[in-house]
Image (cartoon, rainbow, N blue to C red):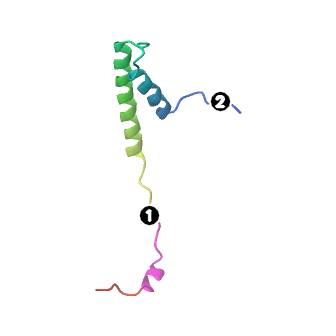
Amino acid sequence: MRKKRHLTIEEKRDWLACVFRDESGEYSQADRFKAMVEDTRLAMLEQEQKEAEPAPKAPALDLDLLAHLPPPLT
């Protein structure tokens, strides 16, 4: 089976969070700032994808079945 070639958005954001929260000094302030900017961009992309997805349709109700229901209580 072939390995995945690309990371998911969640995997990228996890890695960027590690860079941003680095306290060991491995990454410079500029690297940390770039990680924050890229994470923000990915978060916006993720939000746009969620908004672009159509809302799930409600199941269609059979009108004959509704006709057999008792009247609502008052």
Q: Amino acid at mark 1?
A: Ala
Q: CA distance from mark 1 to mark 2?
A: 37 Å
Q: Amino acid at mark 2?
A: Lys
Q: Which residue is mark 1?
A: 58
Identified at 37% across, 40% down, the residue is 47
Give how far across and how far down residue 31 sits, in percent. 38, 15
Span colored in magenta? 59-69
Q: Is residue 48 above or below residue 32?
A: below
Front one among 19 and 45:
19
Give how far across and how far down residue 46 sits, in percent. 41, 37
Front one among 61 and 46:
46
Q: Is residue 12 above or below residue 58?
A: above
Question: Which structural element holds mark 1?
Answer: loop
Question: Which structural element holds mark 2?
Answer: loop
The numbered mark at residue 3 is 2
Identified at 45% across, 86% down, the residue is 68
